[in-house]
Amino acid sequence: MKKTTAFLLCFLMIFTALLPMQNANAYDASLIPNLQIPQKNIPNNDGMNFVKGLRLGWNLGNTFDAFNGTNITNELDYETSWSGIKTTKQMIDAIKQKGFNTVRIPVSWHPHVSGSDYKISDVWMNRVQEVVNYCIDNKMYVILNTHHDVDKVKGYFPSSQYMASSKKYITSVWAQIAARFANYDEHLIFEGMNEPRLVGHANEWWPELTNSDVVDSINCINQLNQDFVNTVRATGGKNASRYLMCPGYVASPDGATNDYFRMPNDISGNNNKIIVSVHAYCPWNFAGLAMADGGTNAWNINDSKDQSEVTWFMDNIYNKYTSRGIPVIIGECGAVDKNNLKTRVEYMSYYVAQAKARGILCILWDNNNFSGTGELFGFFDRRSCQFKFPEIIDGMVKYAFEAKTDPDPVIVYGDYNNDGNVDALDFAGLKKYIMAADHAYVKNLDVNLDNEVNAFDLAILKKYLLGMVSKLPSN
């Protein structure tokens, strides 16, 4: 009896000790603030409405943007060299289910190109396409970019000294990406550059307009943005009218709102198809700077000064762009974990609400990093497919653009060139596609519905064109 009593007492003590830990991790909806943010006057045009349809975005960070690592034995190892885990359809499904409608897929291409024409590896391109398809199959929007490609030797560098090689890199890489995805509809968006800047310069992270190097760099960025637009448009297909994103210097709000920055020209017939790309972790000492580096974990949602740290740059963007019907996307935002959950919930809720009031879309930066003292921008645990701080996400979703239900896309099986018809051109295209090494899975080419695209599909398509098969699958 005494042993039983002692055991029960011991169990009760352990259980009682664990209760605070359990409660500390319990979901607390009361952390999400109730906000009343006045909506500003937003022009009603296709571009602005398109951005609203993207609703809210999430970054697949530290994945395809990785460009180095210690355990890389083949090029596909880059995907896991920073995040530590391969991307799965299950992850994208969880992102969709939580309320996100857009996935930004940052990609560093320079470790995967070869030759003077910067030929992109088919293996790498196919893997990127596979993950793009994860999102497209969920009727989500995708933003595909060139990420850590600012490199004087291997990529582009926005200065007059390196302009010739930079132009060649940007045009070569984007011609290949655009060609691969030419038949994808407007659910796929291209972003020409990520944070173009003078790496290593004293003004790398700040566009000091009194510095001649910075002004020269801004002019070069203007030209590279135009080269990007021209290259994509020239590939034809759905690229002729695809929405494109272009940044200013270092993709900062000041980089896009200074008097030297110029939006690129688009082809005739395209109105508001070019979106301004901005990144803003404001204020940086709270949102991005680690405590060990002098950052702060304090931000007060009721303090006018702290509020202005968010609204000042959004007002500048609104005044120059969205108030005039020019769409803007904040492609990266967030707040690192400093053991300050309540403050981060309030900050991100306020941030998204203020952006929405100005017609601006927000995309959360997530690098899958949850430990250490550095950039703890982890929000979605990719191993468990669970959000570690669900209150933050729910606050963002609450104040994001309204969710829209897209109709199921019409799939024309066997239509390789996506022109709405199935004919000999599709047979020739599919044959060439199958012969390519490591080709990616494309749903409408899988005419026998076995989740593979191979010679069996080609044989069935041939029979269909010869009248030996009366019909192909449909959705």
Image: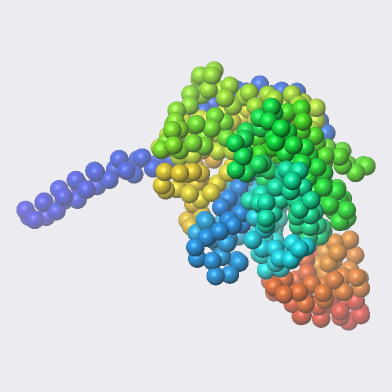
Report the quarter where the N terminus lies: bottom left
Residue drawn at 49 percent across, 36 percent down: 289
Task: Quadrant for residue 466, please give it.
Answer: bottom right
**Can residue 466 be spotted in the picture?**
yes
Q: Position of residue 144 (x, y in %)?
A: 70, 51
Task: Quadrant for residue 195, please give it.
Answer: top right
Horizontal relation, residue 192 to residue 429: left or right: left
Q: Position of residue 275 (x, y in %)?
A: 76, 39
Q: Position of residue 417 (x, y in %)?
A: 86, 64
Horizontal relation, residue 166 to residue 240: left or right: left
Residue drawn at 65 percent across, 35 percent down: 252
Q: Position of residue 40 (x, y in %)?
A: 71, 23
Q: Nearer the viewer, residue 296 or 159?
A: 159
Instruction: Name above or below for residue 302 compared with residue 460.
Output: above
Instruction: Name above or below for residue 427 compared with residue 249.
Output: below
Residue drawn at 76 percent across, 74 percent down: 436
Q: Nearer the viewer, residue 170 or 417?
A: 170
Instruction: Name above or below for residue 46 compared with residue 138.
Output: above
**Can residue 142 be spotted in the picture?**
no
Residue drawn at 75 percent across, 71 percent down: 446
Q: Nearer the viewer, residue 49 or 232?
A: 232
